[in-house]
Image: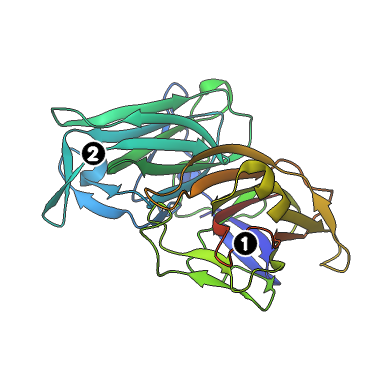
Amino acid sequence: MISRSFWIAGCLLSMPMTALANGASLDQTAAAKIDDGNSGWTWSGMNSVSDPGYTGGAAHAGGIGTFGIYTFQGTRIQVYTMSGPAVVVNGRPHKMGKLRVSIDGKIKSTVSLLQTDQSFEVQACDIPGLSDGNHVLQVEPVGGWVVVDEIRVFGKSGNADTHAVEDTTATTSGADHVALFDPLDTLDNIWNKSAHWGLDNLNSGVMGQDRSRGVRKEDDNEFLAYRAKDITKAFVRVYSQVDQSRLMNIVQFYTSSDGGVTTQPVPYVILGSFPGATTGMWIGYDLAIKATPSKTDTLYVVFNAGSGHVWDPQLSQLSIIIK
């Protein structure tokens, strides 16, 4: 299998990459089909469900607060699901909701899967016109449960992406870009952090049922840092009760190109916001650092004092794109 190597927290890690097995060629009029059981997926809270109607007999299903992540190389992607009144998980029916699809931290589609009759192999969205290179797909439910069965990826000019078919024989290394995704379930991916930084995993029903989030333990200035080689972009989700203008004074990002010896602030934009909870006036914000200085090797997430509460804001998830 082709692997991609990168530096994080001082260690050389390898990310699996998929390639065409045994030198075979693809039908250039067809998409490369990637099942939900492919090893490249990262699932958080979504359970495997079985039915003969699913591709390969299985799919992944989850409710609010769960998600799936997949890094792909291509210029177009389609997401296939199941629609119907409900999905049965562990013997219990769960009402279908809406599927939200994001690419590189930007919401591209939100589609309802709630239908009177059950249908399989439903194309939930078709997203063309992506820049050539690697992208981060995120799928998540909104207002109910969803099922993710498979994705189909196309390369340049709409042709099938030959890097999206699993290979069990070839070995090589090197890539233009890869993505590191951290759902903040643990602090394992963090290279360094200030003394009063921790995790909140006790209030999963508050922030969109996100099971664990990074928080300050005191209402002061706190940071955490990620180390990677050649960071180019970052996408971050936070929950807060403050408005956008106040949030941008509280949440800030810094980068370093010399391992943290010197740092500089880096601008970001708010891609969008959404209701963060049914109570408490929480707002979910999706933030994007669209470009970092050359040879950036460290990214700092800084929460400044100003919200008036130790628990506001909260860091939900972070994706970094590296060269």
**Drawn side of residue 37 relative to residue 133, left or right:** left
Name the residue that disc number 1 marks: 308
- Examine the rendered structure and indicate whether residue 290 appears above or below residue 128: below
Q: What amino acid type should be assigned to the residue bearing mark 1?
A: Gly
Give the mark toward the camera: 1 or 2: 1
Residue 275 disc label: none
Residue 318, position in %: x, y? 58, 54
Q: Earlier in the sequence, mark 1 or mark 2?
A: 2
The colour style of the image is: rainbow
Q: Residue at the far left: name it.
A: 91
Q: What amino acid type should be assigned to the residue bearing mark 2?
A: Met
Name the residue that disc number 2 marks: 96
Is disc 1 placed on a helix, strand or loop?
Answer: loop
Tell me the crowding category of disc 1: few under 14, some 14 to 19, or many 20 or more residues within 10 angstroms, Cα based.
Answer: few
Q: Residue at the far right: name it.
A: 262
Residue 28 visible in the current orientation: yes
